[in-house]
Image (cartoon, rainbow, N blue to C red):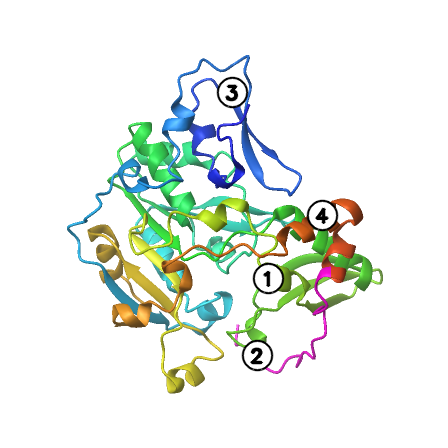
Amino acid sequence: MNVKQQKQDCCGCTACQAICPQKAITMVPDEEGFLYPAIDEERCVHCDLCRKVCAFEDGYLAKIGKTEEPAFEQTYCAGSSTEEAVVCRSRSGGIFYALARQVIEAGGVVYGVAMTEALEAVLQRVDNLEELPRLQGSKYVQASMGEEFPRVAQDLRQNRKVFFAGTACQVAGLRSYLQTARVDMQNLYTADLICHGVPSPQIFRDNVRELETRWHLKIQSVNFRDKALGWRSHIESYEGVNAAGKRKKRYSNLYSTLFGADVILRPSCHRCAFCNFQRPGDLTLADFWGMDQAQARQHARSGLSELLVNSEKGEKMVQGLTGVSLQTITREAASRQPNLYHPTKPSAQRDNFWALYRQYGYRKAAHAHYKLVERIKVPYNRLKYRK
């Protein structure tokens, strides 16, 4: 039995798995590769905590300890790190790194998504600056939360300062879990992302295998938006080793095309409850698109971060930032993100893509469905950053 009856009602945040006192819930992939909670009926004692903890619904603010009309007046900023290497590793302006560094230098821990050696996106805990760069850079694939929610609770119970960054549904799920488990959240600081939607991990794995076969390359790393092609580029770069042991870098827009076409997103993304200015995080991070033409030209390569300050905790973090250049912007300038107003609409071709995928596999579905595949003239080494 599943926690939710309809797949569009589950975002896969794992709060239900974490709260279950009987360990009766496991996250199981469906035919599209998305993880859903399944209940072991022999272990279940019908306490109903799994359903009570779910924050992926209207009225989620009450479940995460926030009011419909918060007393804090939301403010808006845009800017970037003043360190070129930090901006290079980031997909926007590097503000996340500055926030996370502040917490680690204060003796706290940071939770964010990193890519493993197996090219899987997973939530990871970092407590030192040497490992922090692994959490930088957007990962355009749904991350596995593993069993990290209870680990966050353990850190908080030990009076550690915790900074958690993730999608809005992950932040809301964590807060609801902690509130249900009666964990003091005084030392918890959160940042949610303005999210277009999360693609299938299974499709990403198939994409990597397809490219490895075509390129005769063992892919070891991926950059979902390679800044060597400019900040606004949505082209992936892959690095790996060929049979002769030589390291190669190749580019593709196959996966990003499917992502942009909205055919490989999780069903719940199309009815997301978090597409508004009532954010579950203390801060909200995104690309900043509300710049004038002169600013756009200036930051075409480096990128700018947008920062929504949603609480007193968030304001405290921003006031303590060092190594960044920030300026206050208007709500109008911050409003260029469509997913602040509505969820991503499902593509009319989504069912067709998955029908092809089930019958013929990834290669046929991707290539037959979208012709814009790898027709990129890449200006190799046109842009370089100092390390």
How far apart are labels 4 and 2 at the CA level? 42 Å
Q: Is residue 267 magenta?
A: no
Q: Position of residue 281 (x, y in %)?
A: 32, 49
Sooner in the amino-acid sequence: mark 1 or mark 2: 1
How far apart are labels 3 and 1 at the CA level? 37 Å
Query: Which stretch appears magenta?
Result: 369-387
- Residue lying at 26% horizontally and 33% vertically, measured from the top left: 184
Say whether residue 216 is visible: no
Circle 4 residue: 355
Q: Position of residue 148 (x, y in %)?
A: 46, 36
- Residue lying at 24% horizontally and 40% vertically, measured from the top left: 186
Which circle marks residue 24 in the picture? 3
In depth, the one of 60 and 231 nearer the eye is 60
Q: Mark 3 or mark 1: which is in front? A: 1
Q: Residue furthest right?
A: 244
Q: Is residue 268 left or right of residue 323?
A: right
Label 3 CA crowd tier, 10 Å (few <14, some 14–19, many 20+)? some
Sooner in the amino-acid sequence: mark 1 or mark 4: 1
